[in-house]
Image (cartoon, rainbow, N blue to C red):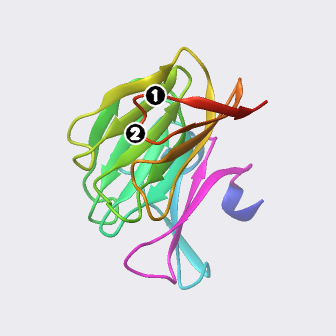
């Protein structure tokens, strides 16, 4: 395994430097945490999660100025390469994160109990109309930040109104 990581749960490219990427691992005791930064196209690495130790990284997303990390303890965000972290969504396992490309302040988080949404880049979060179901993955339409698709335990569902209402597209 690369640098002792048993496996990687998530990968993301640094939004400010395309030669840098992040890997989230499921083995937090290794190297003191579960988030690593690979620089120079992966030729060297460093621990990147000083502020988020002892959690399992389950998902990663990037926006124009921040890295968003979904863990088994909620969402952590950094805008300074992991020097400082904000625990913006406390509690719950985050299986996937989606950032609206056309409006980077809109972020959706897939959880074990539904979909959470923020319209202010993570300052506040609220539940959507999809709850009481396990969400495995989530994506936002590239041209419309209000249209969201989620892979759930009930199949693929979609919302055209910020997650207020959802409809199935098949099982």
Place residue 96 in its image quadrant.
top right
- What span is in magenta? 5-27
- How crowded pointer 1 is (Cα within 10 Å; few <14, some 14-19, many 20+) is rated as few
For image coordinates 24% across by 54% down, the residue present is 84
For image coordinates 49% across by 63% down, the residue present is 142
Q: Would residue 129 appear left or right of 34 to someone viewing this image? A: left
For image coordinates 39% across by 54% down, the residue present is 145
The verdict on residue 56 being magenta is: no
- Residue 87 position in % (x across, y down): 29, 38
Place residue 127 in its image quadrant.
top left
Quick one: 147 or 125, which is closer to the camera?
147
Determine whether the residue tagged by mark 2 lies in a helix, strand or loop.
loop
Q: Would residue 21 appear left or right of 50 to someone viewing this image? A: right
The verdict on residue 12 being magenta is: yes
Determine whether the residue tagged by mark 1 lies in a helix, strand or loop.
loop
Q: In the rendered image of this protein, does residue 14 appear above or below residue 160? A: below
- Residue 65 position in % (x across, y down): 29, 68
Q: Would residue 15 appear left or right of 31 to someone viewing this image? A: left
Q: Would residue 109 appear left or right of 80 to someone viewing this image? A: right
Count of residue discs: 2
Q: In the rendered image of this protein, does residue 27 appear above or below residue 12? A: above
- Residue 76 position in % (x across, y down): 35, 44
Residue 161 is labelled as: 2
Q: Are marks 1 and 2 in contact (CB under 8 Å)?
A: yes
Q: Which residue is mark 1?
A: 165
């Amino acid at each position: 395994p690369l640098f002792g990581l048993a496996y990687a749960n998530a990968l993301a490219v640094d939004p400010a430097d395309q030669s840098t990427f992040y890997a989230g691992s499921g083995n937090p005791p290794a190297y003191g945490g579960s988030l690593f930064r690979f620089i120079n196209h992966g030729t060297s690495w460093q621990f990147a999660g000083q502020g988020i130790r002892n959690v399992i990284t389950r998902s990663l997303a990037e926006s124009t100025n921040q890295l968003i990390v979904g863990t088994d303890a909620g969402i952590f965000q950094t805008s300074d390469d992991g020097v400082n972290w904000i625990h913006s969504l406390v509690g719950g396992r985050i299986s996937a994160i989606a950032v609206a490309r056309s409006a980077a302040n809109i972020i959706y988080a897939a959880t074990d109990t539904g979909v959470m949404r923020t319209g202010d880049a993570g300052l506040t979060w609220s539940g959507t109309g999809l709850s009481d179901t396990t969400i495995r993955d989530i994506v936002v339409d590239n041209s419309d930040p209000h249209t969201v698709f989620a892979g759930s335990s009930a199949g693929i569902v979609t919302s055209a109104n910020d997650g207020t209402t959802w409809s199935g597209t098949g099982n």
